[in-house]
Image (tube, rainbow, N blue to C red):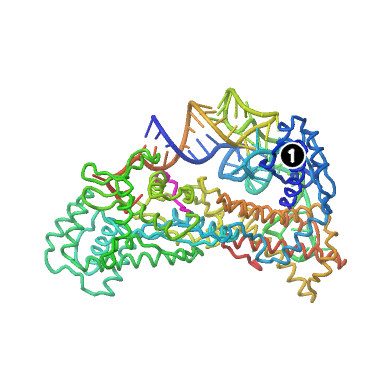
Amino acid sequence: MKDDLIKILKIALNSIGDENDIDLSNKKISIQENKEKDHGDYASNLAMVIAKDLSQSPKLVAEKIVSFLPLEPWIERIDIAEPGFINFFLKQDTHSKILLEIDESRQEFGKNKSGKEERVLVEYVSSNPTGPLHVGHGRGAVFGSVLSNLLRTVGYEVDEEYYVNDEGRQMNTLTISTWLRYLQESGLKLEFSKKGYQGEYVKKIAANLLKEKKEKYILRENESELQELLQAQETEEDLDHLIEWGKLFLEGNFDEIRQFSLASIMSSIKEDLRSFSVNHNLWFNESTMYLNKEGAESSIDKSIRLLNEANFLYEKDDALWFKSTEFGDDKDRVVKRANGDNTYFASDISYHLNKYERGYKRIINVWGADHHGYIPRVSAAMEALGKTKEQLEVVFIQFANLLRKGKKISMSTRGGEFISLIELIKEVSPEAARFFYINRKADQHLDFDLELAKSQTKDNPLYYIQYAHARICSVFETLKKEEKQLNRVLGIENLELLNLDKEIEIQKMLLNYPDVVSRAAKHSEPHLICYYLRNLSSLFHSYYNNEKFLVEDKALMNARLFLLKGTKQVISNGLGILGIDAPESM
RNA sequence: GCCCCGUUAGCUCAGUCGGAUAGAGCGCUGGAUUCCUAAUCCGGAGGUCAUAGGUUCAAAUCCUGUACGGGGCACCA
C-alpha cells in the first residue's frame, strides 16, 4: 500500500521536476501511517521536503503535487493540512483486500524477496566448549535464531553457524580437569587444581570416561610428582606446569581425553540448543584451520602469509604483530606470540577470511556486548586482505539479568556456580524462554523475570498473544460443534460489512505486518515482531469483548469469521518467525 | 585517559533511519461476565523525552558539550 502511494507520488514529483526544469529525482519520498483518524490513513511530507527547491510555500507545493497525482480508484480523497502534509484517505474496502491476500498466501503472508536469495552467514552463540551453556548465552542464541528466520522471510539464503573454539590453552585446561576428576573417580585421593574447571559437569564427563575406557588413563607411577604439582596451583603458570606434566605422562592419551571431553560438551551444548529450537546447520571447528593436509599449508599459516605478503606484519619483542592501526585500530595486535603460539586473533583472521572465501554476501556476527573492542581489529584484518568491510556486520547483544521475585540472580561463573540454560528452559518452557529473550532491543539490558515468564495472565505478553490465537481457534471450534463452517465466498462478498472502528483498525494492522517484518529484518530488530503481535492481540481481545462473531446474520458472520481467520494466520506467522508455536487451545 | 551502549510516566519498556495532540504493560483507581475461553475487556489519573546548546519549516529522534549508569581497552580465550 505504501509502495503504491510512493509510486504515484513519484509520478507527480517527476512532473513537477520537468515543469520547473529541476532535478528532483533523488528526493526521498516517505509515507507515514497516521495515528490520528482525522488525518486519514497515510500522509506524506513530500511538499515540505521540496518546498525550498521550488521556493514556494509548502502548502502551495502540496496543492501542486496533488494536482499532478494520477487518479486511483482506491483513494477516497486527498486532503492538504498545515503546514503542508498531504493526507490520503483510502476507500474502506481497500483495507479488506489484505484479508484476501492473507487468505491466498497463508504461511507465506509477510514474506518478500528483497534479499534476492543472497547468501548470508549468521554466526552466533559460539560459546567456548569448556562447559555447558548458561543463561547468559541464551539471549544471543535466540537472537541469532530469530534473526536468521527473519532474513529468510525477506528472501535471503541463510546459514546459521557455531564457531567451536576447540584449540588453544582452554582445551588443555579442560583436558587436565577431566583427567584429574577421572583419577578421583577411579579412587585416587588427590586435591583438584584450583585453576581447573570447577563445575560438576566435569565430574560427569570423567565418570563417563571411566565407564567407557576403564583404567586406561590411570596413574601407575609418579603419584608424588602429581600430588606436589597439585599442592601448588596458585597461578596460571602453575596450571601450565601441570598441563605439561600431564601431556608428558599421558602422551597420546592426552589427546584422547581431550577429544572425549570436547565431544561430551559439544553434544550437551547441541542438545541444549535444540531443546529450544535453536538450530545451527553449520559447526565450524577452529582446529580445522590448523590442519595441514598432505603438506599443504594450514588456513592459519595462509592468512598470516597473505598479511605478510601485503606488508602488514612486523616483528617486535620476538612476537609477530599486525599493523591494525593502519586501518583505524587503537593499537597494533599480536598474531603470533613470542612463544610461537598463534593468538586467538590469528584464528579469527583466518576464520573470517574463510567466511569471505565461502562466498557469503553478508557476514553477520552476533557478539556479546563485551566484545565490541574486537571490531576494529577484525575488520582491519579483512581490509588488509582486500575484503570489503561493509560485508561484515556485527550485532551486539547486551547482558541479561535473571530476576526471581524481583531480585537479581547472580550469574557469576566463579566456582562453577551458575544457572545453566537448560535449567532455565525447563523452568519457564522453551517458548517463554525464546520470547522473553527476544522481547527487548538487543542493545538494551534485559531483565528476564522468571515469575512473569511463567505466569498465565495477560501480564505475560506471550501468554496474551497465544491466548488470542487459541481464542480464535475456539470460535471456529464452536462453529464446528454447531455443525457449521466458514463460508469463504459469502465472507469475501460481504467484507464491506466490516466497518466498525475495531474492524478497520485490525485490518490496517494486518496490512502493516509485512512492513514490520521488513523493518525488523532490515535493522536486525526482531523485538519489533513481539511488540507487533502484542498490539494485534490487544486489538483482537478488545474486538472479542465488544462484538459477537457467531451471529444470526450469515453475511456478517462470515465476514467477521474471515477477518478472524486472517488475524489468526498473522499471529501464527509472526510467532513462527520467533520460533514459537501458536496453540490451538490453552 | 580513550572507545562502545544507554538515560522517555512511580516501575519495566516501545517509539517507523526528523513529522501533526509522545505510546503500551505493570502498579494506582472506578467499572464490565445469564453471551463464541473474564486466561479477557472498558474508563480515569500519571511525562520539562537526563541536561545545556546547535541544525531544521518541523527534534524524543540528527550534531556538540556536560552529568549519571553499564561494558570494553592482553604476547587470555
Picture quadrant of residue A45: top right
Answer yes or no: is residue A574 visible: yes
Left of A232 or right of it: where is A569? right
Q: Secondary structure at mark 1?
A: helix
| Depth order, front residue of A51/A185 | A51
Is residue A251 part of the magenta span, yes or no? no
Residue A569: percent from left, percent from top: 69, 64
Q: Which residue is depicted at the point 85% across and 63% down?
A: A494
Q: Which residues are magenta?
A: A364-374
Residue type at tag 1: Gly
Is residue A372 part of the magenta span, yes or no? yes
Residue A335: percent from left, percent from top: 30, 49
Residue A50: percent from left, percent from top: 72, 35
Q: Which residue is mark 1?
A: A17
| Depth order, front residue of A192/A179 | A179
| Depth order, front residue of B75/B8 | B75
Left of A400 or right of it: where is A327? left
